[in-house]
Amino acid sequence: MWKCVIPAAVLLLQAANAFSPSPALPSIRGCGRSVSALSNARCMLGAAPFGSDEDMIETVNRATAKGDFKKKINLLGSTGSIGTQTLDIVEYLPDNFEVVGLAAGTNVDLLSEQIKKFNPKIVSVKDDETLAKLKDRMSGWDGKMPEFVCGAEGINDVAAYGDADTVVTGIVGCAGLLPTVKAIEAGKDIALANKETLISGGPAILPLLRKHNVKMTPADSEHSAIFQSLQGVPPGALRRIILTASGGAFRDLDAAELLRLCKEDPEFIRKKATTHPNWDMGAKITVDSATLMNKGLEVIEAHYLFGASYDQIDVVIHPQSILHSAIETVDSSVIGQLGWPDMRLPLVYAMSWPNRLDMPYEPLDFAKMSTMTFMKPDRVKYPSLDLSFSAGRTGGTMTAALNAANEQANEMFREGKIGFMDIFKVIEGTMEAHKQDLNMTPSLDDIVAVDGWARKKTLELADANKKIIA
């Protein structure tokens, strides 16, 4: 027993110390009752149910509620990675979850099977052409047909539909922002798997959550780990958030070697960047992991989710992806969530919070782990971290510009239009150009407008300035 427990504690401390806090950090005593003047300017109540007396009471009330736990789900992005894993959970726990609505893109073969298995009441697809194909696939089925809708309005309809309790937002990119708003306005809790909702829309989303008394729980592994670690932590007791990163496809290359390969063998770099060493994810997020932009974006998301200042958020490379993230409390205790890499674990907790449901996943065996290592991120190799912290500290619409520029640059890289290091260059150029139009109190319309502008600007920088694409 002690051979497992003692090394685990040491490893948690190693993770906590792998990224040194900023010099101001010792004076930061948490977001609440004992906050220094430095951190008080940036601290706030975040989107997740944590940080206030009311949140703690709500957590206890939900956890101790009598009767069987049952939730109805609207699922956005049902045929993607998040969607299929969510439906795996629903299939395993039919007494706890019921599907009400499904929104998908163009994969009608998989969607038709999902309809037959889960019997949703409403289904959305990308467009009229896809809808015609879906209806053709469904012909001859003797089950009850759902209501069919399509396009952007169709996704919004599914998000706000019926008596669903929770909406799982599995749509990738800023496309998930407006459907999430519709779900919030309909009073539905959000299991957030779409990080862009807060990264781009945080300034507008937080007031909406308060207005409609909606709970938002994180469904990605790192923020779920933080959220789980925060359970039972009283208001004012959070000192620091420690985000772990696998390091992505290039974690074993030093900066000089990566730069050499980018110049000498760009196609090797392109191929390697789309393959993750630990996780099975979509193409966009896999490239984000290779650039470490996913971690930079998660820093911003953590700020909006948990109300932490940027001085309270650190990043550490942890190649094994066993410690999914951790927190440090004001008494210097470090609390983390560990487990084998499996996206279903954070998903089921986001859907069931604060309940714990019996799942058949492989338990963590400390003896099998062999070793866990932690290291500081190389900011020369990963300029995305400095870009993200800069955007976050600037605030307002700068995070929306960063996110949109990254989505556009990521896509151009995957299409072979720019090189790996050019991703950072066009993002930085877009952020610099946005400074003159920065809006510190944006509406949702403002955020959507900045998103569109930043994508166009990123394309312009890549097309017009050939020096950027070396």
Image (cartoon, rainbow, N blue to C red):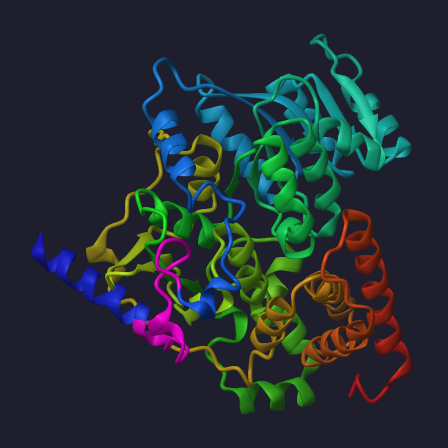
Q: Is residue 180 above or below residue 389?
A: above
The picture quadrant where one finds residue 300 is bottom right
In terms of depth relative to the viewer, which is nearer, 357 or 64?
Answer: 64
- Residue 166 lies within the magenta run: no
Residue 118 image point, x, y percent:
60, 20
Task: Tell me where residue 333 appears, x and y as whole percent.
Answer: 24, 60
Counting every numbered tag in the picture gives 0
* For residue 236, above or below residue 163: below
Give residue 434's position: percent from left, percent from top. Answer: 79, 71
Q: Is residue 332 visible?
A: yes
Instruction: Answer with left or right where residue 348 lies relative to residue 212.
Output: left
Residue stretch in magenta: 17-35
Q: Residue at x 75, y 61 (%)?
A: 404
Q: Which quadrant: the C terminus? A: bottom right
Tell me the quarter of the picture where residue 259 sits: bottom right
Any part of residue 246 in sight:
no
Q: Is residue 30 magenta?
A: yes
Between residue 299 and residue 171, name the one nearer to us.
299
In the rendered structure, the answer to whether residue 127 lies left or right of residue 27 reads right
Please tell me which residue lies in front, 157 or 136: 157
In this view, the residue in front, 296 or 130, is 296
Q: Is residue 177 above or below residue 41?
A: above
Q: Check the image and name the residue furthest to the front.
A: 37
Would residue 75 appear left or right of 366 to someone viewing this image?
Answer: right
Q: Residue at x 47, y 46 (%)?
A: 343
Identify the residue at horizontal 60%, vertical 70% (top origin): 393
The location of residue 420, given as percent across then percent down, is: 68, 77
Main SS of residues in magenta: loop
Residue positioned most to the left: 2
